[in-house]
Image (cartoon, helix red, strand yellow):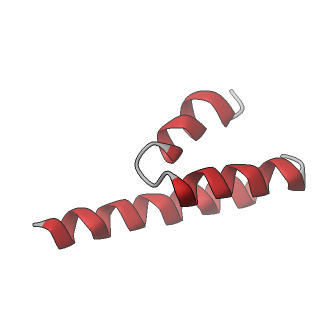
Amino acid sequence: MIRLLGILILVLDVIVVLDIYRSNKDTEKKVLWILVVFFLPLVGPLLYYVIGKNR
């Protein structure tokens, strides 16, 4: 069960990092958001989609 949760978090993080990479943000902002997702694997994607994603 723990492995499944870890795999799901990893897949979510990869999807978010790819979304950040494809965005039209400045390179500095992309690097910052990728670091946030990397260091906060549970909260980072949520923060990106609530705060950082263009609407």
Q: Residue furthest front?
A: 39
**At x 81% / y 47%, what residue is drawn?**
29
- Does residue 28 sit above or below 4 in this rendering? above
Q: Is residue 44 left or right of residue 20?
A: left
Q: Position of residue 27 (x, y in %)?
A: 88, 56
Q: Quadrant of residue 39?
A: bottom right
- Does residue 27 sit above or below 50 in this rendering? below
Q: Position of residue 8 (x, y in %)?
A: 30, 63
Q: Is residue 4 left or right of residue 15?
A: left
Q: Position of residue 43 (x, y in %)?
A: 45, 42
**At x 56% / y 29%, what residue is drawn?**
50
Q: Quadrant of residue 34?
A: bottom right
**At x 72% / y 32%, what residue is drawn?**
54
Q: Position of residue 48 (x, y in %)?
A: 59, 40
Question: How many numbered marks, from 0 up?
Answer: 0
Q: Is residue 2 left or right of residue 12?
A: left
Position of the C terminus, as image quadrant, is: top right
**At x 61% / y 50%, what residue is drawn?**
36
Front one among 17 and 40:
40
Q: Quadrant of residue 18?
A: bottom right
Position of the N terminus, as image quadrant, is: bottom left
